[in-house]
Amino acid sequence: MAETERKFNRVPTHVAIIMDGNGRWAQQRGWVRVRGHHAGTENIRRILECCAEYGVKVLTLYAFSTENWSRPSEEVQGLMGILEMMLKREVKELHKNGVQLRHIGRLDGIAPNLQQQVREAIELTRNNTRITLNVAFNYGGRAELVDAVRRIVADGVKPEQVDETLISRYLYTAGTPDPDLFIRTAGEMRVSNFLIWQGAYAEYYCTPVFWPDFDRRELLSAFEAYDQRERKFGKTREQVAAEAARPAPAVSRA
């Protein structure tokens, strides 16, 4: 079957990706690590388009973690420059293609002019509905939970009012469905502080392929693996089977 004709019974609504391996991809070629990050950025466009084509509604990309500040200063500055370049070069095209751009993470620590560019991009694309692109930049799952708890306390919420639904409303991803498929490239088998609340029941897919080489074919292989899995959400196989066999409730036609 041709690549463009692949069909799936079920496609994830929300795909989250740890774009790992950029630096190693560059080093294998004798290049500086930042060149790998540039290549990885170029790859975002084709993966985003493929997701939109197959009906994915949300794509969340782990671009820069709160821990990444400890990397060599030249690499950190290179990553900041890449974000600035992407915003200047890509936002109008993203807007034209119906992409809603969102930032998840903290803006503090980022240069004021770059913060402003992020806000302007979000405002420009806020009403687009084809697909939402969440860029996790200066993001950490634990930091997200700390920020959520601080806002809950600041709002004077009573302890008995706190439940999972309320906490979700205070996360950076408020209003977004939890990820169905969680992809990590470059062979690592860690969550790395990414969407640690939202990914509780996501299906995980790890591949040895470095992010710059993770193309359409690789993404569709991840979709195929997802399509073949039985999602349980903490239930046993027997519980899932019993629920599937349970007759549908009668519908009143009065």
Image (tube, rainbow, N blue to C red):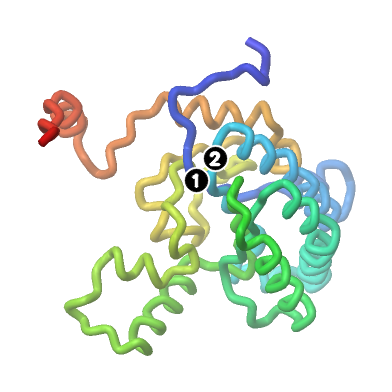
Asked whether the viewer can see residue 62, the reply is: no
On the question of residue 173 being in view, the answer is yes
Compared to residue 157, the image places residue 176 above or below, namely: above
Give the percent coordinates (x, y) of residue 206.
54, 38
Within-10-Å neighbours for mark 2: few <14, some 14–19, many 20+: some
**Whether label 1 touches label 2, CB < 8 Å:** yes
| Mark-to-mark CA distance, 1 and 2 | 6 Å
The 10 Å Cα crowd at callout 1, few under 14, some 14 to 19, many 20 or more, is many
Say which residue appears at 52% left-offset and 58% top-offset: 192
Give coordinates of residue 211: x percent, y percent: 70, 43
Q: Quadrant of residue 46?
A: top right
Q: In this figure, which residue is indicated by the disc labeled 2? A: 56
Helix, strand or loop at label 1? It is strand
Instruction: Tell which residue pokes out farthest to the front in this image.
Output: 254
15 displayed left or right of 171: right
Which of these two is toward me, 211 or 247?
A: 247
In depth, the one of 98 and 110 nearer the eye is 98
* Residue under label 1: 14
Residue 55, x across and y down, in percent? 55, 36
Using the image as rendered, state which of residue 250 and residue 190 is in the foreground. 250
Give the residue at x 49% y 53%: 191
Amino acid carrying label 2: it is: Val
Please give left or right for residue 73 compared with residue 206 in the image: right
